[in-house]
Image (spheres, rainbow, N blue to C red):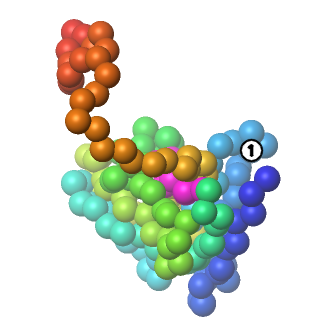
Amino acid sequence: MYQVQFKRLEGNEDIAVPRKMSEWAAGFDLQAAVGEPVILAPGERQLIPTGFAMAMPGELEAQIRPRSGLAYKHGITCLNSPGTIDADYRGEVKVLLINLGQQPFTITRGERIAQMVFQLVPAVTIVEAAELPETVRGAGGFGHTGV
């Protein structure tokens, strides 16, 4: 088990530490730590604070992902999804939201706006090569299978 430390930032004592909403949930819900309601117009994006910073082991990354209910009901999703928080980042965690819906959407303090999923980051070494091994697919890219 990995331990991740959360530091509640000053003035955010009312904002809950990220938590899972069910026993087997993969993501920890994040709340909006906005000072006043934020209205996202259709097509608009804003960076929403969460009121905390964190420290995690170097083997982990935190991915910020949309909440399916907000996406389905209101068209609210995360840009740069999943967003990556690196293990060495110590600033406030923020969520980049966009309104892809048809109506303005109001984000209020304490509202659950996204989820954070922790993933292992493998140790990888990059090796430059003059040639790459052949595969059946080769350089076939977007849509090459006809699907």
Q: Position of residue 87 (x, y in %)?
A: 55, 66
Instruction: Choose top left, top right, bottom left or bottom right for residue 51.
Output: bottom right
Q: Is residue 82 above or below residue 145?
A: below
Residue at 24% x, 30% y is: 131
Q: Position of residue 38 (x, y in %)?
A: 38, 71
Magenta segment main secondary structure: strand
- x, y percent for residue 58: 60, 63
Residue 29 image-quadrant placement: bottom right
Taking the magenta stretch, the answer to whether it contains residue 6 is no
Residue in the picture at 65% in, 64% down: 57
Extent of the magenta region? 60-67
62 falls in the magenta region: yes
Q: Position of residue 124 (x, y in %)?
A: 49, 47
Residue at 75 percent of width and 63 percent of height: 3
Query: Which residue, given by chain and number where applicable, does mark 1 sit on?
Result: 22
Quadrant the C terminus occupies: top left
Residue at screen point 29% across, 10% down? 136
Mark 1 crowd level (few <14, some 14–19, many ≥20, 10 Å Cα): few
Left or right: 136, with 82 as reference point: left
Going by the numbered disc 1, the residue's amino acid type is: Ser
Label 1's element? Answer: loop
